Image: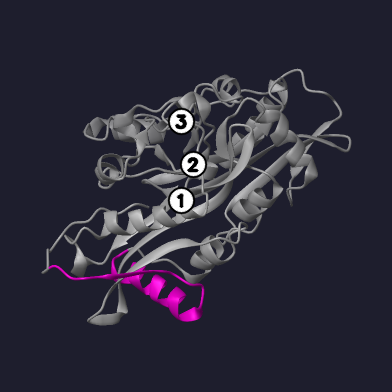
Amino acid sequence: MERAEQGAKPEKIRFEYRPMTLDALDMERFRQCFEDNGSPRTMERLSWQYARNPTGKIYVDFAIDPAEPELIAGIYAVQPARMRVGASLRLGVQSVDTLVDARYRGQGLFVKMARAVYARCERENVALVYGFPNGNSAHGFFERLSWEPFDPVPFLVRPLNTGYATDRLLRSQPWSRWIPRWSLPIVPATLLSPGWRIEPLHTFDERTDRVWREFSRAIELSVERDAVYLNWRFRDHYSKAYTQLALYDGDSLLGFVVYAVLGKHGGSVAYIMELQHEPWRTDVGRALLEAALRGARDAGADVVLSWCLPHSPNRGVYRSQGFVDLPQRFWPIELHVGARGFSVPEWMDLSDPARWYLSYSDSDTV
């Protein structure tokens, strides 16, 4: 989650900047800086995110006050991943953690640290950085770090009952509590093969790689969602929060869905993290999404959220189950989306959302 610089402005300090290492002392200082500034992270989370990242790369910079060398004054961290960039697979990074200690805000550390990390990325032939700055930090990314926006974040929403929606639309009306709380129907998938079955997916493998290759044929910019990435992102995630389902026809895996149900934003929210199928097999997508919605409702979810751009191969599947664009005034938080190229083809416009594939897999907060 990106954090903006604010608060006291001490006298200018000549900070030292250095990359973080993965030794126990640096990792503990990293964790302590988050805790000291009201954004606690467990060591398990930090280890999964940085030490166990499947690329084996780390791009995190610390700012250090020479007068207090044991204290981290600021952090800028990007998370590396293999990315689809046109017809090539390249190393890319996602901006995920920006934090300036409350005692050192007003020193311009955010921009200085980001520029240092970006310079290292350029030296190591990283293709691009992308991410989802919040309302506090967006100005710094777009105005001072040369990011190109491709807003809006593509929120889709699907209520599972009337209560969650009316509570938010009519919360100021005292009579809203008298409105009945009804469960909203889930559309049954139709014309399904009798041999199909939906079962838990315990690990991603060459079968899910095949689905991803077919699903992503027209996608120019995306994290490469192969088995290595998906196993790290979901199966091996520190939270163990995700449900993974696959649709099989005999021994053939035709598609998969990943979702989570979390207590957030004043209710129980389900997130469709990933939904993949061969683009022409929308029947597979509908069956998987129906199963995810029923599972989310059984787990007590009030509403389901997804990120899905208008051109995405699964957009029609979401529409078939009643997902609609979430108006910005109802977004749970203010988010923006953008990118900056370091080494990409001149013809590739990173600000064109039609080139991108995004899903909640890209979120660093779910």
Name the side, left or right, on which 144 lies relative to 279.
left
Residue name at image x 66 percent, y 23 percent: 188
Residue 206 x/y as whole percent: 79, 44
**Is 36 contained in the magenta span?**
yes
Q: Which residues are magenta?
A: 12-38
Q: Which secondary structure lies at badge 3?
A: strand
Q: Residue at x 60, y 50 (%)?
A: 242
Q: Which mark is residue 157?
A: 3
* Left or right position of 46 against 18: right
**Residue 155, how many percent across, how many down?**
43, 32
Question: Hey, what amino acid is under mark 3?
Answer: Val
The answer to whether mark 1 and mark 2 are in CB contact below 8 A is yes
N-terminal of the pair, mark 1 or mark 2, is 1
Residue bearing the label numbered 2: 343
Disc 1, SS = helix
Q: Position of residue 191 (x, y in %)?
A: 76, 18
Apparent side of residue 209 relative to residue 68 in the rendered image (left or right): right
Disc 1 marks which residue?
Answer: 122
Residue 18, located in which quarter of the rendered image? bottom left
User: Which of the marked residues, 1 or 3, is nearer the chain's N terminus?
Assistant: 1
Q: Residue furthest right?
A: 250
- Separation (CA) of disc 2 from disc 3: 35 Å
The amino acid type of the residue labelled 1 equals Glu
The answer to if 177 sits in the magenta stretch is no
In the rendered image of this protein, does residue 111 appear above or below residue 276?
below
Report if the CB atoms under discs 1 and 3 are less than 8 Å apart: no
Front one among 295 and 132: 132
Q: Is residue 342 visible?
A: yes
